[in-house]
Image (cartoon, grey):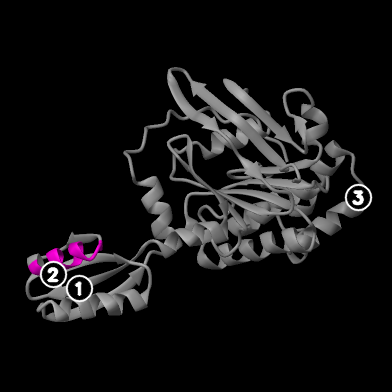
Amino acid sequence: MKEPLISTHQLTYRYGPREILQGLDLQIPQGCIYGFLGPNGAGKTTTIRLLLGLLTPTSGSIRLFGRELREQRIPILQRVGALIETPSLYRHLSGHDNLEVMRRMLGVEKKRIAEVLQIVRLQPDAHRPVKHYSLGMCQRLGIALALLSDPELLILDEPTNGLDPSGIREMRELLKDLNQEHGKTIFLSSHLLSEIEKTVSHVGILHQGQLAFQGSVQELQQATLSAAYVEVEVDNPLMAKEILLTNGYSVEKLGQNVIRVTVQDKEEAAVLNQCLVLGGVAVSGLAFSTQSLEDVFLSLTDAAPMKTQTSIPEPISFA
C-alpha cells in the first residue's frame, strides 16, 4: 500500500492548559483533494500551522512525502505551497510586481510569473494595483504566490472564506484544474461542507480537536444511506408506534400525530405503510427523506458543545 503524502500519528497540541488537538491521525493520499472540515474553532488552522512547521507539536509526529517533518523541515517545505487565511499582499503594487518580489526571494525563473498568472486566470489584471482587486482576485493571487515554486502539495486555509457565489465557483474550478491538469495534491480546510463537497475526493471532519470522520467522499456518502427516514402522519400515533416497534422499526414521535421512522429505502417505506394500514392505523401523510452530506457533517459536529478555543497569535507565514 502506497504511503500517504501527509500522515500524522497521535498529533497533539496544547496552548497553555487547553488541549487544542487530541491524538490526530491524518492520512492524506497523494493526488487527492482533501477537504479538512470542521466548525470554526475546531483546530483546523492550528493543524495547518503544525503541518507547515510554524508550530511545534506537544506530542505526536508528522510525516510529509514519507519524511519526518521534525528532522527534514527545509527540504520538505520546499515542495509545499501554502495560503493561510488572507494572503499578505503589497496593495500598492500590481499583481505582477507582488509575484516578482516573491520570485526574487525564491530564486525561480522569470517565466514562472506568466505561468502562474495563466493558471489562476489573472493575466488581464496582472498590471493593476492590488488595492483595486476584488477579494476573489486577491485569493487567486495568493494561490499564484504559493504556486511560484511549483510545489507538489498545496495547503490552503479557508480559500473561499468571504467570497460571493461567483468567487466560490471560480475557486472550485481553479482547485479542480490544479489537481487534474497540474497534478497538485491539495489539502483544503473549510467550515462548510456545502462549499467544497463538489470539489474534494477525500474528507476529514474535525470536532473539538478530534477526527469525527476520515475517508473518501464515497464513504461519507454511505453514511447517508443509513440516515433515511419517513415522517408519517397517522390518526393514532401510540398504536402506530406499537405496531412498528413490534416489527423492528426505530420510531420517534415528532408532533401530535406525526412519527419519524428510520428506513433503508423507499421500498421499505412502502412496506411500512402497508404494515400500518393492515394494523388498523389510518395514514394521512407519508414523506420519505435522506440526510444530505451537510446534515451528516452537522450531526457529527453538533453531537457535543463546542469548546471555546483560545486564539493563537498569527505566525509569520510564507508563500
> In the displayed structure, would residue 19 be above or below residue 260?
above
- Horizontally, residue 74 falls left or right of residue 247, namely right
Sequence-first disc among 1 and 2: 1
Q: In the image, which disc is placed on residue 240?
A: 2
Q: Quadrant of residue 171?
A: bottom right
Question: Is 279 part of what is drawn in magenta?
Answer: no
Q: In the image, which disc is placed on residue 232?
A: 1
Q: CA distance from mark 1 to mark 3?
A: 66 Å
* Residue 243 shows in this picture: yes
Q: Nearer the viewer, mark 1 or mark 2?
A: 2
Crowding near the residue tagged with mark 1, few <14, some 14–19, many ≥20 C-alpha atoms within 10 Å = many
Across and down, in percent, residue 134 comes to: 60, 59
Q: Nearer the viewer, mark 3 or mark 2?
A: 2
Across and down, in percent, residue 176 comes to: 68, 63
Label 1 with label 2: CB-CB less than 8 Å = yes
Q: Secondary structure at mark 2?
A: helix
Query: At 71% across and 36% down in the image, what residue appears?
Result: 318
Sequence-first disc among 3 and 2: 3
Q: Amino acid at mark 2?
A: Ala
Residue at the disc numbered 3: 110
Q: Quadrant of the C terminus?
A: top right
Q: Nearer the viewer, residue 308 or 94?
A: 308
Q: Quadrant of residue 33?
A: bottom right
Crowding near the residue tagged with mark 3, few <14, some 14–19, many ≥20 C-alpha atoms within 10 Å = few
Q: Amino acid at mark 3?
A: Lys
> In the displayed structure, would residue 201 be above or below residue 104?
below
Q: Nearer the viewer, residue 46 or 117?
A: 46
Task: Find the magenta span and give its range.
Answer: 239-249
